[in-house]
Image (spheres, helix red, strand yellow):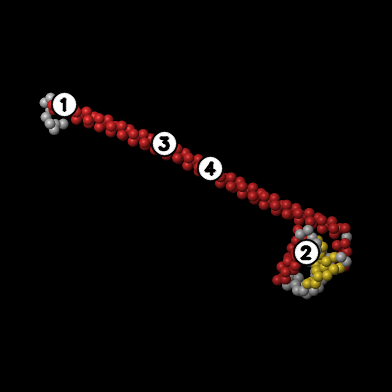
Amino acid sequence: MKLKLEMAEGITVLAVTEEIKNQHGPILKAGISKLFQSGKKTLLLDLTSVTQVDEGIAKEVQEIIHMAPEMDAQIIVVSPIDGIGQAPSRDIAIKQMQSALFGLLATEAKLQAKLRLLEQKKNQFIEKLNGMKTGEVDVLSLRKENGELKKRAQELEKGISKFLSKREDVKYNQMLTDRFNMVTKTLNQILTQDGVVQMGSS
């Protein structure tokens, strides 16, 4: 594949002077994209020297046609091969590009490209909203888990308080037992002194 860049009646023309193979498709597309980016917004792609187009190249050409309005550019493909070109010859293509109808069609294509872009942004926004909703569900789940943990903590706190109160009860009972033992010991001493019981008797 060989490319030739020229001007015809104020229109930028990119002419392909040799046959195109499938591997040339991405190169052609990248080259045209660079032309659009450089400011050449109106382009005529001349494929009249190409006598045979593979399916892969046909697909690349269609992608180039759709790419132009997305980059705020205009392009017309010239080829006598059915299904490839928008005009069969360069002269006819130039006349089409200079007509008011071409400008209207180009404007329509740009508007459709912008509409597609807005649709994409809308879908991305919807995806973000869905992501936020998913995040909210996660937050709610965390809040639910946190509530359950708080409930368990409260139950545990009650259990500990009850356990401590039981321990206090045990201490209190032990104190009573000690006092009882002390009273019993004193009583035994008194009874022993009085001769009521013998030493060592219980």
In the displayed structure, would residue 162 be above or below residue 17? above
Amino acid marked by disc 1: Ile
Q: Where residue 123 sits: x, y (%)?
A: 68, 51
In the displayed structure, would residue 173 be above or below residue 81? above
Choose mark 4 or mark 1, whichever is in front: 1
Amino acid marked by disc 2: Ser
Is the C-beta separation of discs 2 and 4 under 8 Å?
no
Amino acid marked by disc 4: Arg
Compute the Cα span from label 2 to label 4. Answer: 55 Å
Is residue 110 visible in the rendered image? The answer is yes
Q: Where residue 202 sits: x, y (%)?
A: 16, 31
Q: Is residue 188 left or right of residue 35?
A: left
Is the C-beta separation of discs 4 and 1 under 8 Å?
no
Q: Which of 64/143 is in front? A: 143
Name the residue: 53% across, 42% down: 143
**What kind of element bears circle 3?**
helix
Q: Where residue 126 sits: x, y (%)?
A: 66, 49
The residue singled out by tag 3 in the image is 158
Which image quarter: residue 167?
top left
The residue singled out by tag 4 in the image is 143
Of the numbered discs 4 and 1, the one sitting upstream in the chain is 4
Q: Which mark is residue 38?
A: 2
Amino acid marked by disc 3: Lys
Compute the Cα span from label 3 to label 4. Answer: 22 Å
Mark 4 residue crowding within 10 angstroms, few (<14) / some (14–19) / many (20+) = few
The residue singled out by tag 1 in the image is 190
